[in-house]
Amino acid sequence: MILDNNQSIETSFLILPSAFPQFRDFNDFQDVAQRLLELMDRVGVYQLVGFHPQYQFAGTAVDDAENYTNRSPYSMVHILRESSVDRAVESSVDAALISDQNITTLNQFGAIELKARWRACFE
């Protein structure tokens, strides 16, 4: 794996432009990818974060603004070096609040504005 062989690379993306058009299938893929990390003994070394055009957090409605924090034009997995994430969290007093602040900001925009901005990405 490139990340294993080059410590200067902090992050990588696996972008799947034509794969997993349904979020449920992508979510299943993420579970398989996480299991693969476990089998490769890389849990704690790498962290996987999924993005999808229809991303939906558990316990939210499809149109909830907060889902846009993990929406992207294509299905993709962000592979982060866990040590880099740890350093970023340690260097920020409010790192634990970033996710909440992102959700608050997106809720202030509202789902209608976010949908309009999303559509504009494809024009």
Image: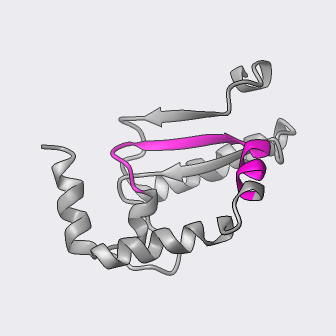
Name which quarter of the figure residue 3 lies in: top right
Q: Which residues are magenta?
A: 71-89
Name which quarter of the figure residue 17 lies in: top left
Q: Is residue 8 visible?
A: yes
Where is 27 relative to 82, above or below?
below
Q: With 103 as the anchor, is 73 left or right in this view?
A: left
Q: Is residue 57 visible?
A: no
Where is 28 relative to 73, above or below?
below
Q: Quadrant of the C terminus?
A: top left
Q: Residue at x 57, y 42 (%)?
A: 78
- Residue lying farthest right? 41
For the residue pair 92 and 81, the one nearer the viewer reads as 92
Q: Position of residue 102 (x, y in %)?
A: 47, 68
For the residue pair 116 and 17, the one nearer the viewer reads as 116
Q: Position of residue 51 (x, y in %)?
A: 47, 51
Q: Residue at x 40, y 56 (%)?
A: 71
Q: Position of residue 107 (x, y in %)?
A: 36, 78
Q: Position of residue 35 (x, y in %)?
A: 74, 47
Q: Residue at x 20, y 73 (%)?
A: 112
Q: With 12 as the anchor, is 21 left or right in this view?
A: left
Residue 2 among magenta residues: no
Where is 121 relative to 106, above or below?
above
Q: How is the image coloured?
A: one colour
Q: Quadrant of the N terminus?
A: top right
Q: How many marks?
A: 0
For the residue pair 31 and 14, the one nearer the viewer reads as 14
Residue 76 among magenta residues: yes
Q: With 12 as the anchor, is 72 left or right in this view?
A: left
For the residue pair 7 and 38, the one nearer the viewer reads as 7
